[in-house]
Image (cartoon, rainbow, N blue to C red):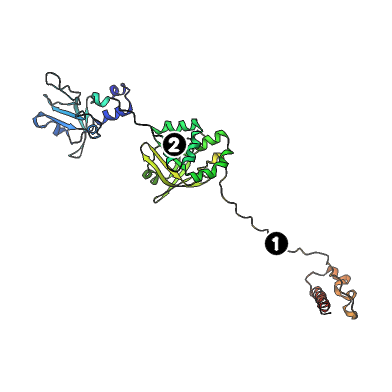
Amino acid sequence: MNSLIAKHLPISSLKNVLSLHVLLDYFGAKKLHQITDGTALAATMFQATGSAPGTSGFVNITDLKGGKVGFAATKDADDSGSLSLDATFVKSVKEIPYNISIIQISHVLSNPDAMAPAPAPEATNITDIMSAHGCKAFADTLKTFPDALDVFTSNAEGGLTVFCPTDDTFKSFLPKFKNLTKEEKSSLLLFHGVPIYYSMAMLRSSNGMMNTLATDGKKKFDFEVQNEGQSVTLKTKIVTAKVTGTLIDEEPVAIYTVDKVLKPKEIFKKAEISPAPAPAPEAEAPKSSKHHHKSPPAPPSDDSADSPADSPADSPESDTADDTSEGGERVKKGFWMIVVSVAMVSMLV
């Protein structure tokens, strides 16, 4: 394989060359040495992709003298009518008859059409896609941070998944966004991108932590993906957002809408959870006093027995009595009954 690696071919060309090595037919060691008429033309995966011009995706297999088998991926024979062989059969590695056969050959199969660089695919404009499908506020904000937008764009070729907040969601967040520092704003935008392509099927089968475009060493900037049935949620330790829709899901780019702005704990620190009301302080039990508090004096009366001077509450001995003694309670009740009676008489008069 060193000769192939040394050519420094683009990824698209390497895929074509490697796909020339996958035949769409079963060829075990026995079949290779019993080819009808001594030669066969086998279609390869390169031919099946539709990228191969004409018949350049076929491999010629020839049973040679001396028990050898040759392989040629060239399109045409030379002027003498002979076909230049690229490789010869070495040995069988693994065979499951009429299902899969893995054989070793001496050299790499290749031809000019397979090595020709494929036209570069049209770059996916992620901001245009988001703007046209309900994420314009997020896309417009991303455009104001060219460095962050470059990170998204450069990852789009190798694999990118974006979670964009819907317009209403992001607009309601803008007042908080404006209070962040420039670095925090950039990190928050990058936090909505993952440098790997995740189809919806992949998201629904994934549970665990995901790094983001904002991840930088100890600054983790990651979130947890959780799924239950068809529902996918993203947990950041600050908020839990739900994936609500798909804008594009075509490898290598996927863009999904979420119902909340993803807030990293590295910026917002504390979870946005409404604090529970503080429990009401428990009423303290009344403390016993060593000195009895005297009841208010009762109004004067002709009955000397009801005089406050003769009441137990005013006697010196009562200073050491407990507040809950029966005598004290009778005095208090009697006083209030007298007050009520006087008030009622006043009203009648």
**Which of the 4 image quadrants contains residue 198?**
top left
Quick check: marks 2 and 1 in contact, CB under 8 Å?
no
Q: Does 62 sit above or below residue 203?
A: above
Q: Residue furthest front?
A: 132
Looking at the image, tell me whether mark 2 or mark 1 is earlier in sequence order: 2
Quadrant in which the C terminus appears: bottom right
Q: Does 239 sit above or below residue 331?
A: above
What kind of residue is marked 2? Thr
The residue sitting at 66% across, 58% down in the picture is 280
65 relative position to 173: left or right: left
Residue tagged by mark 2?
127
* Secondary structure at numbered mark 2: helix
Indicate the position of residue 209 as horizontal and vertical percent values.
Answer: 45, 42
Residue 33 visible somewhere in the drawing: yes
Quadrant in which the N terminus appears: top left
**Which of the 4 image quadrants contains residue 185?**
top right
Q: Residue furthest bottom?
A: 303
Residue tagged by mark 1?
283
The residue sitting at 43% across, 32% down in the picture is 153
What kind of residue is marked 1? Ala
Indicate the position of residue 288 as horizontal and vertical percent values.
Answer: 77, 64
**Which of the 4 image quadrants contains residue 281?**
bottom right
Q: Calculate the distance from the C-alpha at mark 2 to the C-alpha at mark 1.
A: 61 Å
Q: Which sits in the foreground, 90 or 208?
A: 208
Q: Residue furthest top?
A: 79
The residue sitting at 48% across, 44% down in the picture is 167
The 10 Å Cα crowd at callout 1, few under 14, some 14 to 19, many 20 or more, is: few
Indicate the position of residue 267 as horizontal and vertical percent values.
Answer: 56, 39
* Secondary structure at numbered mark 1: loop
228 relative position to 286: left or right: left
The 10 Å Cα crowd at callout 2, few under 14, some 14 to 19, many 20 or more, is: some
Indicate the position of residue 87 as horizontal and vertical percent values.
Answer: 20, 24
